[in-house]
């Protein structure tokens, strides 16, 4: 019996294993049934069968001509679709997978990623926002970052143009630089040119733009008519328009908030960009970074974000205290750093008064006023020095007395955030206040007033500087008078040898007349309206104090005169639309 040798070969993973030969009888092979050839399985199911999750024959039924081919032509349907009367459509065949190329996916991701912006969109559109605010953002804002899907960018959004920032430099030089003489207008222009390459410059530019627009924001003031006549509103024009790529851009809370947020983002980015290696490098303290913090603090305080402003001011002070000046530093740079120290000193003392319960860590500079600096205008140097002399009246004892008053009255400050008093372990108990201390403080302010008259520097100062210094001095007199009133040191008829600041009617007799004299000398109320919220806060404190005293009555003055003073002050204060509704009430 012959045998047939069958080669049994098993292949796995393209590897042929050992083969063996089996001998089978030929009669057995002839008796085995022959099965029909196996039909190849359909590689692709039609769309209907795939949706129903049933087996597709893959063979089109010639009885029906409603199957759509890959190229769009109509042909016969498959068996299942022909039986049920369904539309049959086959998807295009899957292309054969090609061999991968090294780095192809990385290159594909790089080509598909959209370009990112240095400072992504910070505000999202809200249905409660006004049309004006929406238009402002549509004119100015940059496209959003792809990593922030919650803030899509409308197609009308554009980045801030360089011309927008450069148009603010003239206003900065007129209303901001004289009372903050650290960063010159030329340095601002240089920062605008470099802001797209350096985070420090971008942070400075955004913060400078925010505080400048807060100072010059368009508001309305009112003309004073005769007694009893209605107040006529008139527009106070912005000193310089602020055009962007799309035209003139008015100031608005949305725009100023966006500038502050961009400044904060750039400031934080400049800090993280310093650490490019594995180890954390030294802290870099520069005048530019310190003034960025100061500008942001001023903007936040103007929008009543006292806690945020306090934190930014503390950061500026911390950077100032770590600032290192080499022995080869030129004299003008030393003078600028001294002005920077006094700048932080003034802001810290003012913030302590208006918000309360926050310690003051900067003492007066031992060297006194900053050195003379011929690189800055003479009137700027003179006006800034007079502000320093005035704020030195707010010594540590003064601040301790003020803290006692705010705590005793249950006043939680002007924060408007949570109303909860922070922990204050730094407060020391001052000695009891005496009438001699009140007289000494009023005498210090008298001396400053006499120095101003003796120097006759009012003509050399700008009207904005003169208004700021004058109202600041009246504000300090009001604070001293309030401290004396809270402790019962005032008298309706003090002795003739005592200072008039101990009189109960001192604000009505002296401060009211001085304030009316100042208003009469002003060429325009815009000198006060363009000073930001700080001068209005002082003016409101003075006016309300005078009004309270006028209501007490005074036998020494006719009632008609006192009523005229009261009406004049109230009408004068209501001329400013920047006054908050709660202050108007």
Image: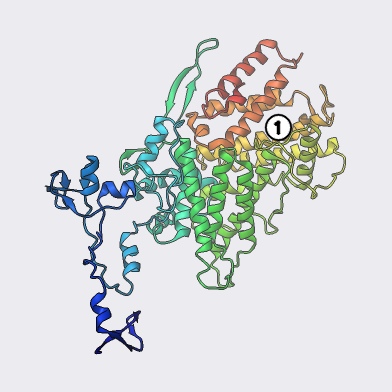
- 200 vs 424, left or right, is left
Residue drawn at x 53%, y 30% is 578
- 410 vs 39, left or right, is right
Q: Position of residue 465 (x, y in %)?
A: 54, 40
Residue drawn at x 75%, y 23% is 505
Q: Position of residue 423 (x, y in %)?
A: 77, 46
User: Quadrant location of residue 494?
Assistant: top right
Q: Which residue is mark 1?
A: 478
- Name the secondary structure under disc 1: helix
The answer to whether residue 376 is seen in the rendering is: no
**Image quadrant where one finds the C terminus:** top right
The number of numbered badges drawn on the structure is 1
User: Quadrant location of residue 135?
Assistant: top left
The answer to which of 394 and 417 lies nearer the viewer is: 417
Residue drawn at x 30%, y 85% is 24
The answer to which of 566 and 378 lies nearer the viewer is: 566
**Image quadrant where one finds the N terminus:** bottom left
Query: Where 14 falls versus 435 (above or below)?
Result: below
- 493 vs 20, left or right, is right
Query: Where 321 falls versus 408 (above or below)?
Result: below
């Amino acid at each position: 019996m012959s045998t047939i040798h069958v080669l049994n070969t098993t292949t796995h993973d393209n590897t042929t294993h050992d083969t063996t030969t089996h001998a089978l009888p030929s009669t057995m092979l002839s008796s085995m049934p022959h099965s029909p050839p196996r039909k190849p399985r359909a590689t692709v199911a039609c769309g209907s069968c795939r949706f129903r999750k049933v087996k597709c024959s893959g063979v089109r039924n010639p009885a029906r001509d409603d199957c759509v081919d890959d190229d769009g032509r109509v042909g016969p349907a498959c068996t299942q679709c022909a039986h049920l009367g369904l539309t049959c459509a086959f998807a295009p065949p899957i292309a054969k997978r090609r061999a991968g190329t090294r780095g192809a996916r990385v290159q594909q991701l790089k080509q598909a990623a959209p370009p990112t912006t240095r400072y992504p969109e910070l505000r999202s559109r809200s249905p409660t926002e006004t049309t004006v605010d929406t238009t402002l953002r549509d004119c100015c804002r940059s496209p959003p970052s792809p990593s922030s899907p919650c803030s899509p960018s409308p197609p009308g959004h554009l980045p801030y143009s360089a011309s927008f920032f450069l148009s603010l430099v003239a206003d900065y030089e007129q209303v901001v630089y004289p009372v903050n003489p650290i960063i010159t207008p030329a340095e601002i222009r240089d920062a605008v040119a470099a802001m797209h390459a350096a985070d420090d410059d971008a942070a400075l530019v955004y913060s400078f733009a925010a505080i400048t627009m807060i100072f010059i924001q368009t508001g309305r003031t009112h003309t004073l008519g005769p007694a009893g006549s209605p107040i006529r509103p008139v527009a106070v024009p912005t000193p310089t328009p602020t055009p962007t790529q799309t035209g003139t851009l008015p100031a608005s809370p949305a725009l100023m908030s966006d500038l502050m947020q961009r400044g904060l983002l750039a400031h934080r980015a400049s800090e993280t960009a310093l650490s490019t290696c594995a180890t954390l490098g030294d802290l870099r303290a520069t005048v530019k970074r310190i003034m960025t913090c100061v500008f942001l603090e001023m903007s936040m305080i103007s929008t009543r974000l006292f806690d945020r402003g306090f934190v930014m001011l503390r950061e500026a002070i911390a950077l100032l205290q770590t600032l290192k000046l080499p022995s080869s530093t030129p004299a003008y740079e030393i003078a600028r750093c001294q002005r920077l120290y006094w700048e932080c000193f003034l802001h810290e003392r003012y913030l302590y008064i208006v918000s309360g319960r926050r310690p003051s860590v900067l003492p007066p500079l031992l060297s006194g006023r900053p050195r003379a600096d011929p690189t800055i205008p003479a009137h700027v140097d003179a006006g800034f020095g007079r502000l320093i002399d005035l704020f030195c009246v707010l010594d540590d004892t003064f601040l301790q007395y003020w803290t006692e008053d705010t705590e005793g009255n249950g006043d939680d400050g002007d924060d408007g955030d949570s109303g909860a008093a922070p922990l204050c372990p730094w407060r020391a108990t001052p000695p009891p206040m005496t009438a001699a201390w009140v007289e000494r403080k009023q005498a210090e302010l008298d001396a400053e007033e006499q120095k101003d008259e003796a120097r006759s520097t009012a003509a050399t100062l700008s009207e904005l500087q003169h208004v700021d210094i004058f109202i600041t001095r009246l504000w300090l007199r009001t604070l001293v008078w309030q401290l004396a009133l809270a402790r019962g040191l005032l008298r309706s008829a003090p002795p003739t040898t005592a200072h008039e600041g101990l009189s109960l009617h001192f604000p009505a007799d002296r401060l009211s007349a001085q304030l009316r004299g100042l208003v009469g000398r002003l060429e325009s109320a815009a000198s006060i309206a363009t000073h930001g919220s700080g001068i209005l806060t002082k003016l409101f404190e003075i006016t309300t104090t005078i009004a309270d005293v006028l209501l007490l009555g005074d036998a020494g003055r006719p009632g008609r005169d006192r009523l005229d003073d009261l009406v004049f002050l109230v009408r004068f204060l209501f001329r400013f639309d920047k006054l908050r509704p709660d202050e108007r009430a």
